[in-house]
Image (cartoon, rainbow, N blue to C red):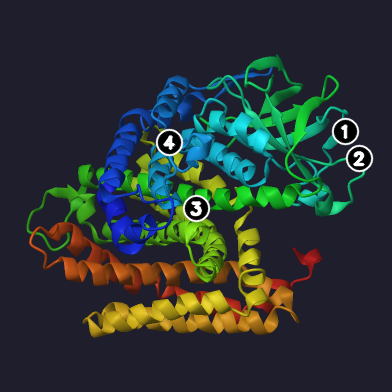
């Protein structure tokens, strides 16, 4: 089944909900005018649909081959990557001084959704490169930036993130990779890293690895981790490639999904030490990596939403074509397309409503990122940064938890054929599963949300966002949409009660709060997603009266938002019960009884 980029909905969200015009008015983003953004969306859609998407099943079937430290990618990937780079897509949001195009993160996010939906395995290579660029742009020396960033922005040298190790998992305090100074400003790196996405491949001549390692005199724990650039091939000051560095892929993981993306075990220093270069100051590596990680977490949220879109499109296509059983209430005895059956329609609407809410909330976060970076008023920068900080774990956690439901519904709509690999529905389910684990599991995102982002600031940002949602609910009621306003009002009240509980309980009883942290994250996703759906309704209502209005598109907005309010927002009350009353049952059973 072919992928069609949802350009109409993306354009609606950019312009009507995320505030593209306000973002384009920020210093440095003046070129992001509607005409240029439309051209970017149309060209990205063509590449995603015609070049990247057809390779999705190819990568799944063929995977990657490791031979003597060299990884050969699936057929077509290398050529598609070359075209991707030649068209300048990696550098879309990279600052112009590093060879990029300097577009807002909001605009780049729209294209990134298309790459992820078309072929999530392929998309991981440029997305990780962008994260590496972000880290180096913020923390590297001018000389290091000049050498690496233009070549990374062009895609000539893609980047990776080397964090965890076999004994460490998510606890990076356990990192043991060593970095010993050589005396000429470089270091010899030795150790092993696991789960390195696109750590080795044949799509580029060089790869820039960002590696966490410890100096000989480093303090224990996370305070003793430094960040190093370790290129696959050593380079001179002019960027010319020299000898192969002492870094090798020693095995490829056999994964449930995303088979087109090589996930590598990387070994550093098997022949004396890989040459690396310190980024910034010693022992600041984890802080530097969080610059990259926050963007990566938002990117993974985009991945979850994008895979959901791909699974939804395939499910709709199948439901239109598959003929089975007569239509209820029809006089026609002939079997009907299953899209006419109520439960299939319920499943499709469940998929659609969540995707639209997630797209709106995710793009709203992208716009907040731009405002935090470029707003001329310092106080506004800080306010928007607090919004970004709060929303990133929500977007990452909610989108990636729900993609498991959405892709599972896609398989269910296919019936028995969904369990057969040839239909492709199962691939979306398999590919999606890792997203709730990438860049910190949902539990880690949820603890970040309740601890650093809610309790530590006494719920200030949470209450502010819920206040905006409340104002939207009041507007919905005034506009004649009580069937949407009432569920949103109730959900907001439940969310506020949970925020109050977290603020009052976190210091004295952190385990009780932690026990309900994932339900709280889901609450915030549903409520803030419902807020965005409500905003979409108010916009659609106004636009319906315009002469050239797309009536079908706008009516679908109203119906989808009503479904979200009536079928998904009621889940908040049950989740709130788990947050407020359910901690004892989470923790009561003796561990020996498990």
Please tell me how many numbered marks the rendered image carries.
4
Q: Element type at marker 2?
A: loop
Q: Is residue 38 above or below residue 208?
A: below
Please indicate whether residue 499 sits to the left or right of residue 32 in the image: right
Of labels 1 and 2, earlier in sequence is: 1
Q: Which mark is residue 301?
A: 3
Q: Which mark is residue 119?
A: 4
- CA gap, disc 2 and disc 4: 42 Å
Q: Is residue 390 above or below residue 95?
A: below
Viewer can see residue 115: yes
- CA gap, disc 3 and disc 1: 37 Å
Which residue is drawn at the image coordinates 78% and 33% (left, top)? 192
Viewer can see residue 256: no
Which residue is drawn at the image coordinates 38% and 29% (left, top)? 87
Question: Where is mark 1, residue-wise?
Answer: 180
Q: Quadrant of residue 245?
A: top right
Question: Where is mark 2, residue-wise?
Answer: 216
Please indicate whether residue 294 sits to the left or right of residue 60 in the image: right
Q: Element type at marker 3?
A: helix
- Contact, mark 1 vs mark 2 (Cβ under 8 Å): yes
Residue 150 locus on image (x, y percent): 54, 31
Residue 422 locus on image (x, y percent): 38, 32
Of labels 3 and 1, earlier in sequence is: 1
């Amino acid at each position: 089944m072919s992928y069609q980029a949802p350009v109409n909905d993306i354009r609606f969200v950019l312009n009507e909900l995320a505030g593209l015009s306000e973002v384009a008015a920020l210093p440095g983003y003046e070129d992001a005018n509607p005409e240029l953004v439309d051209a970017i969306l149309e060209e990205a859609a063509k590449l995603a649909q015609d070049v990247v998407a057809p390779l999705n099943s190819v990568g799944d079937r063929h995977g990657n081959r490791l031979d003597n430290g060299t990884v050969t990618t699936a057929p077509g990937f290398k050529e598609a990557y070359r075209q991707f780079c030649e068209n300048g897509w990696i550098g879309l949001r990279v600052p112009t001084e590093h060879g990029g195009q300097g577009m807002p993160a909001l605009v780049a996010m729209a294209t990134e959704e298309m790459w992820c939906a078309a072929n999530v395995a392929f998309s991981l290579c440029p997305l990780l490169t962008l994260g590496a660029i972000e880290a180096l742009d913020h923390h590297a020396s001018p000389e290091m930036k000049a050498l690496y960033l233009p070549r990374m922005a062009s895609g000539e040298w893609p980047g990776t993130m080397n964090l965890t190790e076999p004994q460490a998992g998510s606890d990076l305090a356990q990192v043991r990779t060593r970095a010993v100074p050589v005396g000429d400003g470089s270091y010899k790196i030795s150790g092993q890293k696991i789960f390195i996405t696109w750590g080795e491949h044949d799509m580029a001549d060089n790869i820039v690895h960002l590696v966490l390692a410890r100096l000989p005199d480093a303090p224990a724990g996370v305070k003793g981790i430094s960040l190093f650039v370790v290129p696959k091939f050593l380079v001179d000051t002019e960027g010319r490639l020299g000898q192969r560095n002492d870094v090798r892929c020693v095995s490829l993981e056999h994964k449930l999904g995303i088979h087109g993306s090589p996930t590598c075990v990387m070994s550093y220093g098997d022949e004396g030490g890989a040459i690396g270069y310190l980024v910034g100051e010693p022992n600041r590596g984890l802080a530097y990596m969080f610059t990259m990680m926050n963007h990566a977490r938002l990117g993974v949220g985009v991945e979850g939403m994008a895979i959901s879109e791909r699974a939804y499109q395939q499910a709709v296509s199948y439901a239109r074509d598959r003929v089975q059983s007569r239509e209820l209430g029809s006089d026609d005895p002939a079997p009907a397309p299953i899209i006419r059956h109520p439960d299939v329609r319920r499943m499709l609407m469940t998929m659609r409503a969540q995707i639209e809410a997630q797209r709106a909330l995710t793009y709203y976060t992208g716009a907040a990122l731009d405002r935090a970076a470029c707003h001329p008023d310092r106080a506004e920068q800080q306010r928007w940064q607090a919004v970004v900080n709060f929303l990133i774990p929500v977007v990452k956690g909610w989108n990636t938890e729900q993609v498991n439901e959405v892709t599972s519904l896609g398989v269910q709509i296919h019936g028995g054929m969904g369990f057969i690999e040839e239909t492709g529905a199962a691939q979306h389910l398999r590919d999606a599963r890792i997203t709730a684990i990438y860049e910190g599991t949902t539990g880690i995102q949820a603890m970040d949300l309740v601890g650093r982002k809610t309790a530590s600031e006494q719920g200030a940002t949470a209450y502010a966002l819920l206040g905006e949602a409340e104002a939207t609910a009041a507007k919905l009621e005034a506009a004649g949409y009580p069937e949407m306003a009432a569920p949103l009002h109730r959900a907001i009240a439940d969310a506020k009660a949970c925020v109050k509980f977290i603020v009052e309980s976190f210091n004295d009883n952190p385990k009780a709060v932690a026990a309900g942290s994932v339900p709280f994250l889901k609450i915030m996703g549903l409520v803030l997603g419902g807020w965005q759906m409500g905003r979409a309704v108010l916009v659609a209502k106004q636009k319906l009266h315009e002469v050239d209005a797309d009536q079908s598109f706008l009516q679908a907005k109203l119906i989808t938002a009503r479904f979200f309010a009536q079928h998904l927002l009621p889940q908040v009350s049950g989740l709130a019960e788990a947050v407020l009353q359910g901690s004892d049952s989470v923790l009561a059973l003796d561990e020996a009884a498990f």
